[in-house]
Image (tube, grey):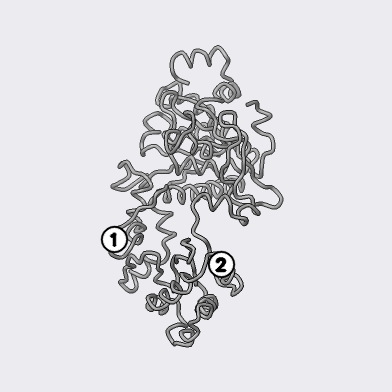
Amino acid sequence: MDEDHATAGRGPLDGIRVLDVSTLFAGPLAATFLGDFGADVIKVEHPRKPDAARGHGPSKDGVNLWWKTLGRNKRTVTIDLGSPEGAALLLQLAATADVLIENFRPGTLERWGLGPDALHAANPALVIARVTAFGQIGPYSHRPGFGSLAEAMSGFAALTGQPDGPPTLPPFGLADGIAALATAYAVMVGLRAVSAGGEGQVIDMAIIEPILMLLGGQITAYDQLGAVQPRTGNRSVNNAPRNVYRTGSGDWVAVSTSSQSIAERVMRLVGREDVVTEPWFASGHLRAQHADLLDGAVAEWIGQRPTEEVVEAFETAQAAISPVYDVRGVLADPQYQAIGTVQTVDDDELGPVKMQNVLFRLSGTPGSIRWAGRRHGADSAEVLESIGVTPEQLAALRESGIV
């Protein structure tokens, strides 16, 4: 990939260079989000120990499939950061960058001579995002940790699952994904501060925190009322009916009644207009206390009808309903197709490959998928030569295992 190709068709973050020296999911995914909108993301990996994400999930003919999405829009470079020569190379790269994202255990970069003081000496405007399970300080800061621990520690797992079942973890990197979104946002805040005349700074992103924020007002409710939210399965403590229901065709659909008007429409649709006038029906919280009655009525009505008729009736009544999809349903759904949620990318290893599109649509400066995840170290020569490493020096660095 030449430099012209790497910078062509960039989005609103054109001109921002990001060094992604993180591994697995939260840090790398944050860098992906930035690359999707035009940032020049340089993925730095160990020469002999690639990002472990390259080995996660299914592969085809030895090519990891998850990496094609996680590694998209990134140039890949190999450097042994634990060696003095490798640390010097990273400092040279940092001098040309705007952002560095890392997720080593606290103290690791400092041990290599690459802590924030050294990085800011090389580039005072650098925004450094440090993504760890527990944060840079505190009694747990040096523990190993992943998103699953954040899902447990935040209270998410305690809320998830059936009331008579165990706490449940999600089958994907939920906390990592939420932390990635928060990290990308934090990076943009840091860049805005620099553009306003400030200096570079350090972002301390603890994966245990963003997911906690998304769990709502539980802390305040406990502080003020001593209330602890229980596991309620697919039901909500804030409104009803809200559940998944099986149609007469054997499919599952989800119904939500977060607004009062939609709750009324649903109950009229299923022939239980009588409950709409009950005093308790006027409050979502009180409706939730009558979930058995409301769920039973909705489940019976839906279960007697084929899926197409159910969805059409809900749409006509302007009530909220959605099929429960697996990936096949997502790909076939006309709404996803209309907004371009899934894109096909040409890849030199797999040929045409489908993946999720960028996160949102900007009318004037849209993002794009310029290429899928590249091979380990595919761009080392191009990137290192751009900071003054000669072909002879590069050959020596490769011979010594530094790159």
Identify the residue at horizontal 33%, vertical 55% (top origin).
Answer: 168
The vertical placement of 30 against 222, above or below, is: above
Residue type highlighted by circle 2: Val
Q: Position of residue 102 (x, y in %)?
A: 45, 38
Q: Quadrant of residue 49?
A: top left
The vertical placement of 102 against 396, above or below, is: below
The vertical placement of 56 against 337, above or below, is: above
Would you say 228 lies left or right of 31 here? left
Q: CA distance from mark 2 to mark 1?
A: 31 Å
Q: Mark 2 touching mark 1, by CB under 8 A?
A: no
- Which residue in the structure is indicated by mark 2? 311
Q: Nearer the viewer, residue 242 or 204?
A: 242
Disc 1, SS:
loop
What is the quadrant of the N terminus in the image? top right
Would you say 165 lies left or right of 269 here? left
- Which residue in the structure is indicated by mark 1? 165
Identify the residue at horizontal 44%, vertical 36% (top origin).
Answer: 53
Badge 1: residue crowd in 10 Å (few <14, some 14–19, many ≥20):
few
Extreme residue toward the right, this view: 364
Identify the residue at horizontal 46%, vertical 62% (top origin).
Answer: 250
Q: Position of residue 162 (x, y in %)?
A: 33, 63
Residue type highlighted by circle 1: Gly
Identify the residue at horizontal 50%, vertical 71% (top origin).
Answer: 258
In the rendered structure, which disc, 2 or 1, sits on the residue that comes first in sequence? 1
Q: Position of residue 176 (x, y in %)?
A: 43, 47
Q: Nearer the viewer, residue 105 or 149?
A: 149
